[in-house]
Amino acid sequence: MSGLDHLSMELILLILKQVDQRDLYACALVSRQWYAVANPLLWRSLMVKNVASFTNIHTTLTESNHAFLQHHIQSINFGCTLSTPAFEASIRYAGYPRFVLARQAPHVTNNRLRPLLQRCQNLSFFGLGWSPITQSSMITLGQHCRQLRSLHLQNCRGLGCAIFPALAACRLLEEITVIGCRLDGMRFPRTAEATANVLVGFDRLTRLKLDDPPNDFSQCLLGPLTSTSDADSADDDTDDDMPTIVTWPRLVHLWLNRCEDIGDMYTIAFVRTHPHLQSLYVYGGRLTDATLRTMMNCLPGIVDVGLVGNFDITHRGVRRLVQNCPALIWVQLFGCDIATCHFPEAGPSCLDEDLFYHQGIMQIRKENEFLVLLIFLWIGTRSF
C-alpha cells in the first residue's frame, strides 16, 4: 500500500468519498496520510444506537480535538432514548449537522432543542418523535432553518395546527410528515383554510403525509370547489365545476388518514390536476369506483393505492384499476367488504391469512403480464 503515498490529499479524498463506512475504517489504517483524510469522513454521520455507542462517541470527542471533528459532522441519528445529560452532551458536540433524527425523544424539550436549531442554519432534514416540544420549537425551526427540505413529526402531542404557519419561511420543503400531533384546531373553517393556504405555498412539495386531518382542512387541501352538488355524484367523465388549480406540481405521494367526509368530487379534482402521483392514500373516506376510474385515466405512473375504510369501493372497480394501471403493485383495502371469492383466478399460492393484523389486506401485483392477487382475509364487522 506504500505505493499509494504519492497520491495527493485531494485525490485520496475523492477516492474515499466513494467508499462505504466499513471500508473507510480499513482505509484509515493504511497510513498517516490516509488516516488524516478518512477520519473526518468517518465522523460525517453519527449513529447513536445505544448507550454504549454514545459513550464511545462522547469519550472520543472529549479526548480529542472535538472542535475539529464537530466541523465534519453532517448527520446525527438517535436510535435510542438517552438520558437528559447524554442528549445535551450529544447536542453540544453535534456541531452543525444537516440531518437530525430522534424517533424516541421524551427528553427533548424546547429549551434543549433550541440551541441546536439556532446554530444549524443549513439543516435540511429534521425528524422528531414522542417529544414534549411545543409551538416555540417550530417557530425557532422556521426562523433559523430555512434550508429545511424534510420534516417528520410523530406523536409530539404539544404541537397543534400552528405547525405549518410557523414554517412558512421554509419554502424549500419537499417532504412533510405529521402523525399523532394535535391537528384538531383546524376543525374551525377559517383556521383550516388559512392553514391549507400555507401548505399550498410549499410548491416544491413531493411527499405529504398527515394523520387525522379535520374534514374542513382536508377539503381545503384537496382544492376549492365551486359546485354545490353532492360529493358522491361526481363522475370521471364529467368536467363540470372541477377546479384546474395545480396545488403541488411535483407531488408524487399523498397520504391522508381518517378522511370521513372526503368523497369522489374532491379526490377526482385533485387526481386530475396532479398526474405525477405515484402513491395515493385516502383512509376512511367515501370514495367510489368513480375515483378509481379517474386514477386509471389520469395517473399513468401510479404504484400504490390505499383505500382503507372506503366501503363503497367494489371488487369490479379494483379489478379495472389493476388491469389498466401497468405500474400498480400495491393496493390496501382494509375492511372494504372485498373478499377472496371476488377474484377466483387467484390460486391457492396467492392466498394467505395474516392472523397478526386480523384485517383484510389485498396486494395486487402484475408480474410477467399476469394478474397476481395476494389476499389476506379479514373476519369482522363493517366498521372502520
Image (cartoon, rainbow, N blue to C red):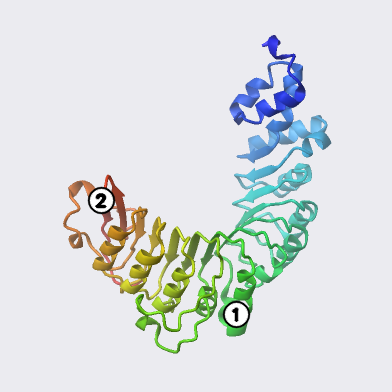
**Residue at 56% of width from left, 66% of height from top?**
248
- Residue linked to disc 1: 193
Give neighbour class at mark 1: few <14, some 14-19, many 20+ (Cα, 10 Å): some
Task: Give the side of residue 189 with respect to residue 275, left or right.
Answer: right
**From what the image shows, is residue 94 above or below residue 57?**
below
Q: Secondary structure at mark 1?
A: helix
* Alpha carbon separation for disc pair 1 and 2: 43 Å
**Residue at 27% of width from left, 58% of height from top?**
323
Q: Position of residue 64 (x, y in %)?
A: 81, 30
The amino acid pointed to by label 1 is Glu
Q: Is residue 307 visible?
A: no
- Residue linked to disc 2: 372
Q: Quadrant of the C terminus?
A: bottom left
View extreme (top): residue: 2
Considering depth in this image, is 182 or 304 the residue closer to the camera? Answer: 304
Q: Is residue 232 visible?
A: yes
**Residue at 19% of width from left, 63% of height from top?**
342
The amino acid pointed to by label 2 is Val
Considering depth in this image, is 42 or 134 the residue closer to the camera? Answer: 42
Circle nearer the N terminus (1, 2): 1
